[in-house]
Amino acid sequence: MAQTGEVLENTLLAENVNQYLIYAPQIVERRKAGQFVIIRLDENGERIPLTIADADSESGSLTLVVQEVGKTTAKMAKLKVGFVLKDIVGPLGSPTHIDKFGTVVVVGGGIGIAPAHPIVQALKEAGNRVVSILGARSKDLLIMEEQMRKASSEVRICTDDGSYGTHGLVTDVFKELIESEGKPDLAFAIGPVIMMKFVCKLTKEYDIPTVVSLNPIMVDGTGMCGGCRVTIGGKTKFGCVDGPEFDGHLVDFEELMKRQAFYHEQEKESYDSFKRKCGSCAD
């Protein structure tokens, strides 16, 4: 379903990462862990998919955490409280399959910590022991630590530069966990494609079922355009309707990374042009 969405809050979480509270009660009422929305700022705006990081049924607000990577997200970063999005469509995608699995490890890397949050919440509520491994390049770029600690049974943190938590990668922390406590019953990996690829490489070695959440190039979000197609186990799937979650051991990550880079030059040109012409504008 589609509705307008009023910006209730716009908070800077880390460098180039903002958290938005958007008033969208009809979507809040229907959303489940793992689902996403597509927003459009104005009549001529780009449609961009954003995974729901949290929702509050009492206030009717969705939490969206967005990294500034292009023209539209740069415009979003400047939105003021009270701005009304032209439309917000959702909830979209298949919800996360939630059950009582036992011990579940959820790996969130960078901005991927945000979409991991509602999944951790749902898994914990279903009676699982949930160990969250959070990774960031540095302490200053780590987001939602407090929320993840509240939602998880245990949290382990690592940073690339060693400024906080373990000095190393999420795969280092995950391997140490496996070797000290044994294999978990299930794993989730959400974050940069390269991170998910190597988490899946590790879990495949230990025969740990692993779910990844993919965010391929997407236009309509209903399976019509085919822009979000991914190869899963040798078969073509659509990220918007078949996903966004898939068996990580079946994903063709090499193809996915190539497709993600298709429009990199055009996106960079548009972003750079916007920053030059409208670096201080409010809308």
Image (cartoon, rainbow, N blue to C red):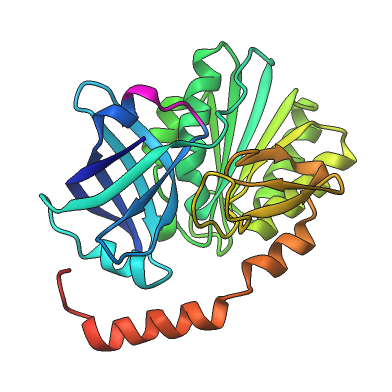
Q: Quadrant of the N terminus?
A: top left
On whether residue 186 falls in the magenta region, the answer is no
Asked if residue 184 lies left or right of residue 46, the reply is right
| Residue drawn where x is 66% and y is 57% of the image | 193
| Residue drawn where x is 59% and y is 24% of the image | 130
Residue sitting farthest toward the left: 82
Q: Is 262 or 276 nearer to us in this picture? A: 262
Q: Quadrant of the C terminus?
A: bottom left
Considering the whole magenta stretch, tell me its main secondary structure: loop
Location of residue 209 (image quadrant): top right
Residue 278, relative to residue 112: is it above or below?
below
On whether residue 30 falls in the magenta region, the answer is yes
Q: Position of residue 145 (x, y in %)?
A: 41, 41
Q: Can residue 102 be seen in this view?
A: yes
Q: Is 168 or 83 nearer to us in this picture? A: 83
Q: Is residue 172 visible?
A: no
Where does the magenta region start and end?
A: 29-33
Q: Position of residue 258 (x, y in %)?
A: 71, 69
Residue 243, relative to residue 183: is it above or below?
below
Q: Where is residue 255 in the image (x, y as percent from the top left)?
A: 77, 63
| Residue drawn where x is 87% and y is 49% of the image | 234
Q: Position of residue 244 (x, y in %)?
A: 60, 42
| Residue drawn where x is 23% and y is 28% of the image | 60
